[in-house]
Image (spheres, coloured by chain):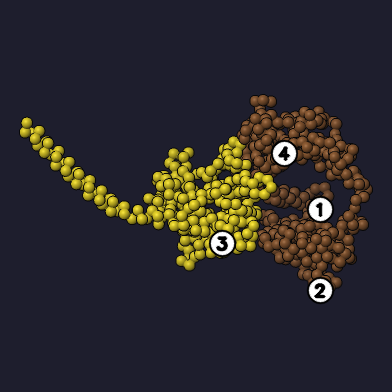
Amino acid sequence: MKPIGNCRPDLDIVDGLAKAIKRAYQKDGAFPEPIRHLAWDYGDHADPHRVAREMNGRYLVDVSDKDGNSFAAGKQVSGFAQLRDDGTTMSGNWIYCGGYTEEGNLAARRDATDAPNGIGLHPKWAWVWPMNRRILYNRASVNRKGEPFNPRKWVIRWNAEKKIWEGDVPDGAMPPGEMNPFIMLASGVGQLYSPDLADGPFPEHYEPVESPVRNPFSKIQSSPCAQIWQSTEFDRYGKPDVFPIVATTYRVSEHWQTGAMSRNMPWLVGLVPNAFVEIGKALAKREGIKNGDRVIVSSARGSIEVYALVTERFQPFFIEGRMIDEIGIPWHWGYAGIVPGDIANDLTASVGDPNSQIPETKVFLCNIKRKDRA
Amino acid sequence: MSAPTVKPKAMIQDNTRCIGCRACMVACKSWNERPADHTDFFAGAGYQNPRDLDANNYTLITFNEIVTGAKPDWVFGRQLCMHCEQPACASACPTTALTKTELGPVVFNESRCIGCRACMQACPFVIPKYDYENLAPKIHKCTFCADRLEVGLEPACAKVCPTGAITFGDRDDMVAEAKRRIATAPDTYIPEIYGLEEVGGTSVLHLSSVPFDQIGYITGLPKTPMPDLTHRWLRVTPRVFAFLYALFAALLWIVRRRTARQEHRGEKT
């Protein structure tokens, strides 16, 4: 279906840009060769299937492998094991290699049949990287003979008669005992001791920087390695006596990220128009909040005014004999667009995970009051 | 024109596969060129918007908060025209603006609609909606994308559904597929196909994990086609009208005669 107005898919925009830039470099430019010779062959109107096929990769010349199989130039490669570093094959991204083979676009498959292990892998429903392996490091589910540790809920198992693995795509096709499961680690085995991690070498449970409970597993309350910035007025942290409620943030399927695009799309706006907070019935009753009331949610860093959605789906936690309420705030709103709304990230803390720097937006402390009582 | 051997189509609405993303609602708006809704907050449970079908919303995902497992969760339902095998709306329409096509869709000819709303009264599923905002209001409802079906495409909602909750095909195949799903996963489905026999069968077949009345469906409908029920009475209408014509003609004759006599007497005095 055609998008409304001047909306265009990302690919159309990128394709138009790339073609214009290539045209400009045909005439002149500093170091023009990489742009002039950039392979850009997705059709007059860029076809996403051509892009996906290129991501998968293909043979550039006729090649044959050591088992005597030959592959014609132009055919799609069937997986990243076929890729070579001698210029005879190409692939846009090895992770997607195997997703768009000579069998077609495997990501478009919608066959819900389960694998023989019956644990809900559904291997012919779409496609996952790498190589449609549904559970990574699945060789950790079998012993060195290839027998599942749990025969009732097996992931893979070795068929000694046929000399094949059954169930999920194994993490390495070698027979049992010939390779270790954790293929991305030098040792190949699971590690409790991990000197590579900033907060290692041993695993430890830390509470979030803002938490309503004492860390029951350690004397250290929260990670001493977390990235905590102290550079702005928003780098402040709340205590549970003032902010006793746990808040989390998430998305809804009708909006995309901060909503810069989706909040300008009238049909999506009609479905989810306003910023809102989801709260449980017990908390709503205590605070005198009814479904659809305007409420003020505040943290040590700021406050927002949103609608309250009262729902049974949010239920309090019971931790160390205490009832602790949780609320949830979708974060798609901002100050512009058809439907502006207060911004959930005005509340969240800019705390970074020690290894990934992913911010601690999934849990922080807050308070909630009906607007006329705030 | 389609060949007389054409097989009627149907659609499975498998609510157990629905994730409530509402791509079907947006695709419906897009294909049928319906304007967006001006909503404030939510109009029903959960994220439901709008509250009901209307002249600009031919389909609606309903959010039903029910305890199914350990905790309350959403169970989704869907409202759209059922495209009855023998549609009550078409039989009630005095101008034949509504007709059942060979392929299955119950289609609506806007130029014939006089806005009488007889179809709204007749529909057992309460589907047709009136365009109250319009100065010359008409009826609106899901078309089963009849224009797409004619050129071999599936309905827009079935095309975009990312989870396979909407399956489109020949009705015979869809009935078999719905039965197969229930038989192979009896823990997932209740053993009922909504639309298989309701009012004589429909072109939309709903499947569910919970009883249909829990997700807002109209249940307890007869298996007899609605036009059959009404036909028992409607077929006597010509006789009723003939009788009324005779009755009123007789009354008119009596009244005229009396008036004439009175006038005659008046002239004398």
Q: In which quarter of the view is residue A150 placed?
A: bottom right
Residue corresponding to mark 4: A316
Residue nearest the viewer, comparing A53 with B135: B135
Any idea which chain is the brown one in this picture?
Answer: A
Amino acid on which the number 2 mark rests in the picture: Glu
Asked whether the residues under marks 3 and 4 belong to the same chain, the reply is: no
**Residue B57 relative to residue A90: left or right:** left
Q: Residue at x 69, y 55 (%)?
A: A48
The amino acid type, in three-letter code, at marker 1 is Pro
Count of numbered tags: 4
- Quote the CA–CA distance across marks 4 and 1: 58 Å
**Which numbered disc flags the more N-terminal residue, 2 or 1?**
1
Q: Residues within 10 Å of mark 4 (few under 14, many from 20)?
A: some
In the rendered structure, find residue A34 and report the number of the disc placed on it. 1
Cα separation, mark 2 vs mark 1, equals 53 Å
Q: Residue at horizontal 78%, vertical 37%?
A: A321
Q: CA distance from mark 3 to mark 4?
A: 43 Å
Q: Assign a secondary structure to mark 3.
A: helix
The quarter in which the C terminus of chain A is drawn is top right
Report in which chain the residue with disc 2 lies. A
Pointer 3 and pointer 4: residues touching (CB < 8 Å)? no
Q: Which residue is mark 3?
A: B174
Display colour for chain B: yellow
